[in-house]
Image (spheres, helix red, strand yellow):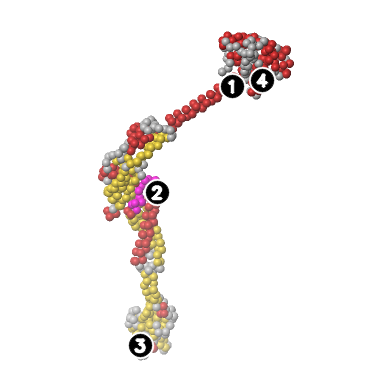
Amino acid sequence: MRSSVEEGIFFDNMPKKVIDIFPPQKKRDIGKSAIPEKAELKAASFEEKTNFKPEKQINISHHTENATKKSGGFLSGFKIKKSSSLTSPAPESIKEDKSSFLPSSRKAGLGQRGVRDESKNIHSSSPFATLGQMKKRTQLSSFFLLGFAFLFLTFAASYLTLSAAKIEIWPKGEVVNFDAKLTVDKNKDKADFSAKIIPGQIIEEKKTISDTFFASGKIKKENKAEGIIRVYNANSVSAQVLLANTRFVSASGKLFKTPSRVTIPGAWYDKGKLIPGEVDVKVAADQPGLEYNIEPTTFSIPGFAGTEKYTKFYGKSFQQMSGGFSEEIIQITEADLRKAEDILTKKAKEEAEAALKNDLKKKEGSEGINLESLASGIQTEVGEKFTSGSIGAEMEKFEYKIGVKSSVLVFQKDDLVKFAKEFILSQIAQDKKINEDSLKINFTPDLNNASLSKINLALAISAKIYSDIDILFLKKVLQGKTQSETKAFLENQSGVVKVKVEFWPFWVKRAPEAEQKIKIKLNLD
C-alpha cells in the first residue's frame, strides 16, 4: 500500500487521463504551478488527516536515484525517507535536491526555465509507467478469462454435441429346422404362400453343331468281267444252237459263259470257198476278279472237245473284257448313323446347357433368378438332323449335323426366401424374430414328376431365431441412466445373454437424453 507522502508528490504536466485517477483535492493541487507549494499543501493535508509527524526530511534526490537504478533507468516512483525534523523542507531545498539527480545538460537549463518545469519533465514518467503496468495486468487478466471461457464452452459443447452411448446386446438365440414342399408353376403370375406356390418362367437355349465321322461298315464287293465274243461256225452250212451257260475258254484258260441260248448261223460257200457263219455273243466270266479283265484273245468251246466240232466252232474277242473285280468296300451302316447322332446329341446338350447356365448366372445377378440349383431339371430336345450319307452308302466318312434346344423352369430367388421366412414365422412364437443372415434353404426338385410348366421342390429350411427386443423402448428407458445402471437394467432383461455399455467421451457419466445419441446394436452371431 502506498503511503500518503508518496501520494503527495505531483507534477504539473500530467496528462488529463492521469489526473483523473486522483481525488478532487489532488486535482486542485495539480493546478498549482510551484512544487514547494504543492509539497506544503500535501504535507499539511497529510498531517491533518493522519496526525503523522515526519522525523526526517524527504531526500528526493537520493531515493529518486535509487528508484532509477532499480528500474533500469526508468523512474517508477518515490520512497519516503523519514526526517528528524517536523517541518517540511523549504522550497529552495526541494529545488536543490531535485536538481541534484538531473543530467548535466538538464541542469544547465534549470536556471532558465525554473525548477517546476524541470520537475515536470523529470517525474512525468512515473505515472505513465504505473498506467502501463495496469494495462498489462488488465490484458493478462482478460486473456486468462477468455481462455477459461473458451475451455468451458468447448467442454459444454462437447458434452452436448459429442456425448453418446454405445450399447451392444447379445440376445439369446436358437436354431430351428423345418421341411416344406413348394411348387414352381409357370402358369402363375404371383406367389401364393398359403397354397405353397410361386411363379416360374422358362429359359431356353438352342444349339446346332456338326461333325465328321468315319463309316465302320465293311463288305466284300465283287463283279464278273464281261465282254463280246464273236463265235464262228466252220463246221457246216447248218446252224448250231448253243445252250445258256455254254462255256468258252480263253487261250489263257479263263472261263466265260453265255448268259442265254445262242444260235450260230451255218457256213456258206463263196466261189467254192467255205465261209464260216458267225454271231456276236455276250459272255461273262465264270468268277469275279480283276484277272478276268483279259485282253482280246481266242476262245474254244470245251463242250465240243473230242469231236470234229471242237475245231470247227471257236470264238474271238476284239475288245478287252471289263468290269471284273473283287474287293472290300467301306460303307455307312445304321449303327454308324446312330452313333453319330448320340455323340452330337450329348455334345450339343452339354454346350446348350452350359450356355443356358451361363445365361442363368447373368440373369441371377441382374434379375434375381435362382437357376443354379435347378440345373438338374434342364430338359434337352433334339431338333433337326442331317447326314451326308445314308445307310449302305459306300463312303469312308460322312458329316452329321444336329440341332438341340435346352429348357429349364426357373423362379425368383426372392420368392423362395420370402416363402421360407413366412413359413418359419408361422411355426414359431410371436415374440421371436429371424436372424436373416443365418437363413439357409436347400431344395431338391422332383424330376420324376417335372415338366417345363411345373416342378415340385422339397425344401430343407434352417435359421437362427431370437427374442424380439424393442430398441425404441430401450432408448427411452435408458435416458439419463449411469453406465452401471444401464448394464444392470439390460442384463436383467429376459432373452439377453450379454451386454456391453460404453459412454463417450470418457467424462460422460450418464446416458444422453437425446434418443439419437444412444446407439444400440444387436449382435446375432
Type of secondary structure dominating the magenta stretch? helix
Tell me where residue 194 appears, x and y as whole percent. 26, 43
Q: How many marks?
A: 4
The residue indicated by pointer 4 is 65
Question: How busy is the neighbourhood of tag 4: few (under 14 within 10 Å), some, or many (20 plus)?
Answer: some
Mark toward the start of the polypeptide (3 vs 4): 4
The residue indicated by pointer 2 is 362
Classify mark 4: helix, strand or loop.
helix
Q: Disc 1 residue type? A: Gln
Tell me where residue 142 appears, x and y as whole percent. 53, 24
Q: Nearer the viewer, mark 2 or mark 3?
A: 2
Q: Is residue 449 left or right of residue 24?
A: left
Give the CA distance from mark 2 to mark 1: 84 Å
Q: Nearer the viewer, residue 434 or 444?
A: 434
Mark toward the start of the polypeptide (4 vs 1): 4
Give the CA distance from mark 4 to mark 2: 102 Å
Mark toward the start of the polypeptide (2 vs 1): 1
Q: Disc 2 residue type? A: Lys
Q: Image height check: is 395 above or below 515? A: below
Magenta segment includes 289: no
Give the CA distance from mark 3 to mark 1: 172 Å
Q: Nearer the viewer, residue 85 or 105?
A: 85
Mark toward the start of the polypeptide (3 vs 1): 1
Residue at 51%, 27% (x, y): give it: 147
Disc 2 + disc 1, Cβ < 8 Å: no
Give the CA distance from mark 2 to mark 3: 92 Å
Residue 84, quarter of picture: top right
Residue 121, quarter of picture: top right
Mark toward the start of the polypeptide (4 vs 2): 4
